[in-house]
Image (cartoon, rainbow, N blue to C red):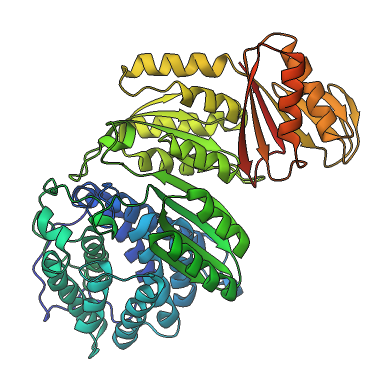
């Protein structure tokens, strides 16, 4: 339980720290995650910029929590030369790296860059003057990371914090001046950004940063700062579509796209230009070959393709925003007051193309890349990002059953009603999503989706990496494997021929619809060849084809 706030007395020095050593960094990261966790709902409720999707507090908390876990990992590791604790440089670098890897949303991505900017200075010294320079570096680097900075946001609050302590001083003095400067700037944000003024709130990201600086102040002084006055939930905004997204009189982009990117600096500069032309709210943070990319776009696939051209994107997340003019389904029922949507679907999918497809259908997606299955924490994060009272979770992989069950159980403990449909393949998830109707009762919707998934038999084509024994015999490295319901049923030399054999075997048991999900690695013309094969041999069977893009098996097949 946190201590009750006490008045700040500059004469009292007993609990003060004059150096932000590794233990202080650890305490600050823990306190930041704790306080943001406690205040995230209040921050979510005032989130109207850049998109009124009510998740800024949650994103900041998840980013801070990832940063804290990275610091704890450094403390848990064996120290150099037998030391029992890391030095300050190791601690602040872990803090920044953890935030970079775990950054969520627009404000969380900016927070990660603020911490990275601070780490660059604090690694060389951790007294008051270094903290003042660290805050200045952080504010400048965060502003540089945002393609089109806006005043009245977290960037303004960060600049005010740095400006407030520019004259330096002891560590407690600098922390106090930074906090006071940030708090004053936060109060002025409704007069700087019209959407905040109309909603009657301060900037949500800015309030989160004041919370972070308040945790720092408490860490170095031993006393919590005066609490911020309670913030009312945002008033419903007049119908001026898109203004909160940086658009003037038109609806904003439909998707939030985030991914980590391994790329060289020169490639990232080209990526920024391309993404800036595709959408808005562009933030690219990081360095030294690893970047966190955040953008709002209408074409999620194009945003991911730009990342593929620049380097190697992974941990791709695509979230479908509310569309004010559409029927009130899933996340679209969440209004500017930060209320949770009535119901949402969370789906794990291989390949960015499938992720974009399901995002268009209103799902919150989590991409599974080869050799990088999502963890239980990532699944729980996706459920939280859906920001709904009721969530249908589609793991789409037998191996994710345990992790998905754990995530569902923890989400239920947080008050979210979660139904886990044990889909074993992406084609089953697509079938379930196709019959999803949020207007039905939750139980009826889950039953219908479960029935659709269960009625879909699935197959996958893969290439053997090594010699091994299978249920269809011994395969050699490079052989094409046709897996039906998870078991190897066909071993072939040619992917197209093997796919035809797999289709024939599946359709011998009947079927009305064949779903083909083709990856970029598949032979050219594979989908056309298989569609023609079905038309010739199975006159009453329809075929639908989807493109999975990169990161998926060469071919997924579903038969309903």
Quadrant in the picture for residue 213: bottom left
Image position of 257 with respect to 362: above or below? below
Number of residue marks: 0
Residue at 32% x, 37% y is 331
Residue at the outermost bottom position: 167
Direction from residue 101 to residue 462 in the image, left or right = right
Whole-percent x, y for residue 193 in the image? 17, 65
Direction from residue 525 to residue 542 in the image, left or right = left
Residue at 74% x, 41% y is 522
| Placement of the C terminus among the 4 image quadrants | top right
Which residue is at the front of the view, 195 or 406? 195
Whether residue 1 is visible, yes or no, is no
Quadrant in the picture for residue 441: top left
Which residue is at the front of the view, 100 or 125? 100
Image position of 79 with respect to 422: above or below? below
Whole-percent x, y for residue 445 in the image? 38, 18
Quadrant in the picture for residue 262: bottom right
Whether residue 246 is visible, yes or no, is yes
Residue at 36% x, 71% y is 114
Residue at the outermost top position: 509
Direction from residue 292 to residue 59 in the image, left or right = left
Image position of 283 with respect to 505: above or below? below
Whole-percent x, y for residue 401 in the image? 55, 28
Image position of 418 with respect to 65: above or below? above
Which residue is at the front of the view, 116 or 346? 346
Which residue is at the front of the view, 230 or 290? 290
Direction from residue 46 to residue 63 in the image, left or right = right
Whole-percent x, y for residue 320 in the image? 39, 43
């Amino acid at each position: 339980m946190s201590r009750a706030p006490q008045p700040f007395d500059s004469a009292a020095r007993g609990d003060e720290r004059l150096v932000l050593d590794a233990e202080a960094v650890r305490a600050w990261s823990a306190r930041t995650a704790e306080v943001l966790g406690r205040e995230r709902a209040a921050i979510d409720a005032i989130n109207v910029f850049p998109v009124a999707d009510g998740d800024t507090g949650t994103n900041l908390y998840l980013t801070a929590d990832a940063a804290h876990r990275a610091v704890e990992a450094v403390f848990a590791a064996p120290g150099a030369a037998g030391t029992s604790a890391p030095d300050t440089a190791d601690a602040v670098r872990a803090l920044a790296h953890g935030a970079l890897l775990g950054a969520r949303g627009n404000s969380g991505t900016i927070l990660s860059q603020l911490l990275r900017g601070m780490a660059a200075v604090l690694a060389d010294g951790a007294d008051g003057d270094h903290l003042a320079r660290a805050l200045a570096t952080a504010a400048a680097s965060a502003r540089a990371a945002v393609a089109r900075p806006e005043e009245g946001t977290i960037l303004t609050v960060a600049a005010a914090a740095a400006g407030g302590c520019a004259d330096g001083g002891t560590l407690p003095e600098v922390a106090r001046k930074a906090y006071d400067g940030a708090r004053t700037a936060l109060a002025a944000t409704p007069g700087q950004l019209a959407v905040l003024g109309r909603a009657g709130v301060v900037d949500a990201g800015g309030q989160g940063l004041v919370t972070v600086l308040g945790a720092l102040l408490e860490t170095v002084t031993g006393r919590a700062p005066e609490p911020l006055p309670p913030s009312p939930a945002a008033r419903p905004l007049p119908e001026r579509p898109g203004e909160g997204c940086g658009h003037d009189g038109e609806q904003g982009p439909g998707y939030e796209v985030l991914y980590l990117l391994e790329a060289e600096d020169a490639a990232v500069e080209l990526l920024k230009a391309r993404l800036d032309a595709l959408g808005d709210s562009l933030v690219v943070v990081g360095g030294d070959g690893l970047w966190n990319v955040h953008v709002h776009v209408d074409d999620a696939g194009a945003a991911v393709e730009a990342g593929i051209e620049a380097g190697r994107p992974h941990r791709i997340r695509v979230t479908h925003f509310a569309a004010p003019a559409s029927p009130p389904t899933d996340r679209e029922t969440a209004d500017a007051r930060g209320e949770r949507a009535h119901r949402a679907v969370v789906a794990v999918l291989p390949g960015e193309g499938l992720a974009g497809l399901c995002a268009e259908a209103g799902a919150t997606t989590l991409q599974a890349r080869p050799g990088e299955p999502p963890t239980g924490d990532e699944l729980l994060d996706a459920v939280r990002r859906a920001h709904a009272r009721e969530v249908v979770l589609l793991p789409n992989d037998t191996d994710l059953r345990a992790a998905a069950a754990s995530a569902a159980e923890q989400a239920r403990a947080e008050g979210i009603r979660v139904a886990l449909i044990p889909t074993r393949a992406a084609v089953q998830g697509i079938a379930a999503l196709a019959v999803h109707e949020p207007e039905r009762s939750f139980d009826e919707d889950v039953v219908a989706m479960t029935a659709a998934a269960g009625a879909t038999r699935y197959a996958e084509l893969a290439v053997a990496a090594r010699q091994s024994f299978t249920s269809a015999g011994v395969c050699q490295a490079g052989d094409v494997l046709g897996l039906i319901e998870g078991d190897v049923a066909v071993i072939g030399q040619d992917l197209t021929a093997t796919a035809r054999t797999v289709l024939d075997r599946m359709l011998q048991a009947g079927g009305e619809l064949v779903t083909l999900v083709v990856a970029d690695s598949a032979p050219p013309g594979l989908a056309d060849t298989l569609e023609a094969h079905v038309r010739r041999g199975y006159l009453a069977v329809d075929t639908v084809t989807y493109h999975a893009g990169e990161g998926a098996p060469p071919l997924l097949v579903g038969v309903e």
